[in-house]
Image (cartoon, grey):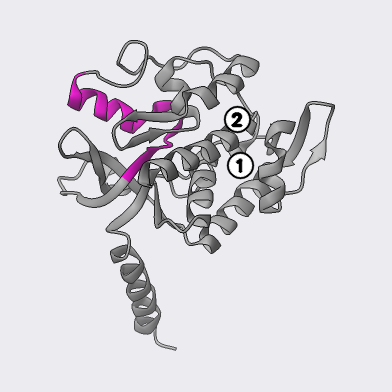
Amino acid sequence: MEEKFISKAIIENYIKNFISCLEVDVAIAGAGPSGLVCGYFLADKGFNVAIFEKSLRIGGGMPGGGIMFNRIVVEKEAIGILKEIGIRVKKYNDELYVADGIETICGIAYKAVRKGVKIFNLMSVEDVVIREKRIEGVVINWTPVKIADLDVDPIAVKSKIVVDATGHDCELCRIVEKKIGGKLDTETGKVIGEGSMWAEIGEKEIIENTKEIYPGLVVCGMAANSVAGSPRMGAVFGGMFLSGKKAAEIIEEIIK
């Protein structure tokens, strides 16, 4: 077993997979709970989906749970999504359930990948492609290039729809806001920024805030609340799952 064949196997397989995703139906920035759930439901409908995650690991805030207690709380309205995927949950009271954060993120990622979602970690989305006042792709680069501030040009991925699932920073929406001069689908036309923690309101508003924020750009998860100025929620994730599913439904209607 020569090392060169190990290296060749890795490189050949990765490159083949990467090339197949240079043009996709949907490009998702962020492999957190909403991004992965969105990808899962889209792939289940037969769409070609690629997720680009800037971190080494996937899962967003779920592996850390609350203050590094790796348990997450999920409202009963979202339990159906976890049960469909096969995640075990425990009833806490009439409204809330508890799940293992590690099991949840591993389970969602596994099912998403088996459905056909391609996940590229350590890959940052640094820009978007705009044509005729519509988002038609993303511009990506290796995260270590960004961290080291190296002068290395990125490459583009073409897609019918782009999803901002980047969490609190709502990175793609902020990029688009700068490019178009503040014409997003919000009260002010701009990114408002997330409010202080208020789980009950934040969980309700995240579904309403999940939408096509600009032609070709759908926002979901915590990014949706950040754009709209709604509160953050802490380690409550039901709204994140429901937001990811709603984003997939919105995208299906757009692509039709």
| Disc 2 secondary structure class | helix
- On the rendered structure, is 63 left or right of 77? left
Q: How many marks?
A: 2
Q: Which is in the foreground here, disc 2 or disc 1?
A: 2
Magenta-span inclusion, residue 206: no
Q: Which numbered disc covers residue 39?
A: none
Q: Position of residue 245 (x, y in %)?
A: 54, 40
| Disc 1 secondary structure class | helix
State how far apart marks 2 and 1 are (Cα). 17 Å
Which region of the structure is painted magenta?
Answer: 161-181
Is residue 75 visible from the viewing direction of this image?
no
Q: Which numbered disc covers residue 239?
A: 2
Q: Which numbered disc covers residue 63?
A: 1
Q: Nearer the viewer, residue 249 or 23?
A: 249
The residue located at (32%, 28%) in the rendering is 173
- On the rendered structure, is 5 left or right of 37? left
- Disc 1 marks a residue whose amino acid type is Pro
The residue located at (19%, 24%) in the rendering is 180
Of mark 2 and mark 1, the one earlier in the sequence is 1
The residue located at (63%, 18%) in the rendering is 199
Q: Position of residue 189 (x, y in %)?
A: 30, 15
Magenta-span inclusion, residue 179: yes
Is residue 35 visible from the viewing direction of this image?
yes
Magenta portion: prevailing SS class: helix
Q: Is residue 90 above or below residue 93?
A: below
- On the rendered structure, is 107 left or right of 53? right
